[in-house]
Amino acid sequence: MIRLWAAGAALTFALCSARDARAFCRATTCDSNDTDCELDAEQCQTVGAPLAWTSGCVTVHVQADGSAAQGVDYVAAAASVTRAFASWTDAPCTDGKPSISVRVKGPISCDASEYNVDRGNANIVVFRETWPYVGGEDALGMTRVRFNPTTGEIYDADIELNAAMEALSVGAAQPGHVDLDSLLTHEAGHLLGLSHTVDEAATMYPGYELGSTALRSLASDDITGLCRIYPPNRNPSSASCEPRHGFSDACGADQPAPVSGSEPSESSCNFSARRTSSIGAFVLGALFLFGLRRKRRLVVASLTTAAVSGCSLDTRELHYNPESGGRAGASAEAPRQPGVDQGGGAGESDAGSPGASDGCTDLDEDGTPDCEQTLIENATFASDVAPWTAEADAELSWDEHNAAHDLPSGSALLRVTGSATSEAQGAALQSASQCLSITGKQLVTVYANALVAADQPSHGQARVDVLFFDSRACASAYVSSFSTPQPLAAVNGEWLALKAGAISGANTKSVLVKLTVSRPFDAASFQAYFDNVLLKTAAVD
């Protein structure tokens, strides 16, 4: 996730173009939503000032109540956080240990991820038992970093852990669980200024196998990266561990009057009680449940931009509620439905339906039939499912079920299978996809109808994922993504209207549209219908 700001005059650092032979990548101030953030052969950004703490000590506070849903109390959480940061601060550099230390403290009352430009602050580790980020519902965790966009000096950083999606384990490895120490060690690397690496043996590699504890131990690539940022002979700007503007256990809105000398404040798109365009803010290293397979359930990390940061579009109105502990909420208004049957075949049309126009759906309600606007091929599944391609363990077929009564076409039925584990929590994401060409920075919006049959598990879902690539034909790794959230009024057996959107990066060359089902781990199979897939682009300044 990405945002930008600046506080005070400072020297500008340039990322050196002459690079040593290594794979590690440093996070930089470059915002791919606004700038062409060029990548080198190792997928490291070559533009912007590299991020780092300038002091020799950072304090991290752990949420007071841990996660009751995961059975992780404050003591266990604090111990796990301590072990995670110790893996980094005890790393053996060539001439000693890194010139950065991390003090783990707590408990802390405020669980809002925020940076206060005129009040006290805290770098926090917090569990979210309700995950607030639209488009990032599958994130296992993410790190939000606020910084000076000119110098790259880190001002504040928070780690947020998703306690709603996957089962977490503390201590010995447990099959099918996310090892908390491993997840925290990965996120701690982001808090210290590292980005993802292409070295598959590294803790900062964007991939995790459920049940594994491998990320607890740093690889040589991780150690080299940290020692490059914080060499033993570095001269820190300060030995103080105090957060910027001092420490406070309370959230900004609950603190006394502002202190003098704070940074100027103005608005930006960010889940933060206090927003400022004079401070940079990235969300680094959100670990995403991108795809699970038999024998190896893979959780892939993605540096996601607008979708997870709260800039994505939604059929619900997003708002930040500081009184709800830093969580995002949504209005109760349900999305408008096109003329629908409840999971049946063709029927008479509803001429007054706002979702239909001239024999074609109009989900975006702009007066132009979707089939005349969409970039998707075979968006209405007129007679088959070409050119959509299903993943392994997924079967895509044409079906007569139809979201709009007046269309003679059918829909795409996506069936997925897998091994059922009765007590396992979470879900496997499986999909069918289509790759399209788009170029540069654009507002990309996706709409679709989806139906989960009434006899399917109620905790399964159907959605659309959109992945952006800086390569043609959706080759190599994707660089950002967004997903349609589950509508608040979703009911099995009824067609849903899905909608979401985000801004593509300046280097975007292709986009992968995925019809995705979330099969609960306790179900051996799951299926859903998709119809009327609209993908639109619009120029942005």
Image (cartoon, rainbow, N blue to C red):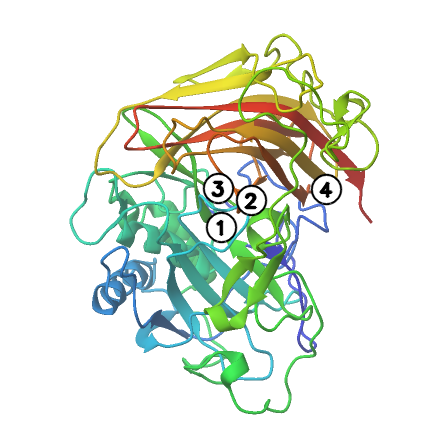
Q: Which of labels 2 and 4 is toward the front?
A: 4
Q: Residue at position x 33%, y 54% from top?
A: 185
Rate crowding at label 1 as few (under 14), some (14 to 19) or many (20 or more) other CA atoms within 10 Å. Answer: many
Q: Which amino acid does label 4 sit on?
A: Ala
Which tag, 3 or 1, sits closer to the chain's start? 3
Q: How much space separates mark 2 and mark 4, taking CA atoms?
A: 16 Å
Q: What residue type is labelled 2?
A: Cys
Q: Which of labels 3 and 4 is toward the front?
A: 4
Q: At numbered mark 2, what does the secondary structure look like: helix, strand or loop? A: loop
Q: How much space separates mark 1 and mark 4, taking CA atoms?
A: 20 Å
Q: How much space separates mark 3 and mark 4, taking CA atoms?
A: 27 Å
Query: Foreground residue, 93 or 433?
Result: 433
| Labelled disc at residue 195 | 1
Q: Position of residue 157 (x, y in %)?
A: 48, 66
Q: Is residue 149 above or below residue 362?
A: below
Q: How much space separates mark 2 and mark 1, taking CA atoms?
A: 8 Å
Query: Residue tagged by mark 2?
Result: 44
Q: At numbered mark 1, what does the secondary structure look like: helix, strand or loop? A: loop
Query: Foreground residue, 274 or 509?
Result: 274
Residue 123 seen in this snapshot: yes
Which tag, 2 or 4, sits closer to the chain's start? 2
Q: Residue at position x 57%, y 54% from top?
A: 332
Query: Residue tagged by mark 3?
Result: 21
Query: Residue tagged by mark 4?
Result: 506
